[in-house]
Each structure stands twice: as structure tokens, then as C-alpha cells.
Amino acid sequence: MASDALSDAAITEALTMLDGWERDGDKLVKTFETATYPQGLAFASAAGMVADGMNHHPEMSIGWKKVTIEFTTHDAGSKISQKDVDAAQAINAITIRK
């Protein structure tokens, strides 16, 4: 079942409720900072498991004490959909201790 892309207005509204997430073209993006590199690995693993449980899989980049996550919905024409918003909200609920 294909997902519907959100309108620009809907994306702008969703971003007001997604602490730290930004729109980069047709992606929702956020860089999470961690205290250590291993903590970043653990966070990326937790975020990946949350996303997998939602059957929605982001692009992730793990760097020195940071993890960048990008969501787009391929079956919505590689646009931002409600799936992206929901996954971003779920990942924001993961606690990172610094």
C-alpha cells in the first residue's frame, strides 16, 4: 500500500512538534549528539530497532559522538509522509544520557 506525500503546510506543521528535526528537501533530518562514540553506536542501534518495528527504515550516519538520521518515504515518491513524522517522533522518545 503506497503512502501519500504530505503537503508543504503539513510538513511545516509537523516540524513544530518534532524537536530538532529539519526538512532537507524531501527528507526529515536530525543529528543527535552523544557523549561517546560507543553511546552513538548504541543509540543508532536503538533507533534502528524502533524504525524496524515500524517497518520504516532511515538512512543513518554514525560519526564521532553524533548520529544523523534521514527519513523519506520511497513509496510516496521519495517524499515526506506521515510515516516519516511518526518514526521521527518515536526516535525522539529515545533517551540519550550525556
Image (tube, rainbow, N blue to C red):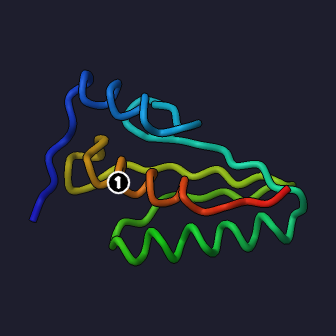
Question: In terms of depth relative to the viewer, which is nearer, 93 or 49?
Answer: 93
Q: Residue 62: x, y in percent? A: 73, 59
Residue 55 position, x and y percent, is 33, 73
Relative to 24, residue 31 above or below = below
Q: In the image, what residue type sits under mark 1?
A: Asp
**Which residue is the site of mark 1?**
86
Residue at left offset 25%, top offset 22%: 9
Q: Does 93 sit left or right of 52 as displayed?
A: right
Q: Quadrant of the N terminus?
A: bottom left
As drawn, which residue projects farthest toward the right? 36
Are there few (<14), some (14-19), or many (20+) residues within 10 Å of tag 1? some
List x then y, in percent, for residue 91: 52, 59
* Above or below, comparing residue 31 to residue 63 in the picture: above
Identify the residue at image location x=42%, y=66%.
Answer: 57
At x 29% / y 55%, what residue is drawn?
83
Q: Is residue 39 above or below residue 72?
A: below
Query: Total marks drawn?
Result: 1
Seen from this angle, which residue lies furthest left? 1
Q: Is residue 94 left or right of residue 36?
A: left
Viewer-nearest residue: 20 or 38 = 20
Tag 1, which secondary structure?
helix
Q: The C terminus lies in which quarter of the figure?
A: bottom right
Identify the residue shown where x is 32% and y is 27%. 13
The percent position of residue 49, horizontal first and vertical second, equals 51, 77
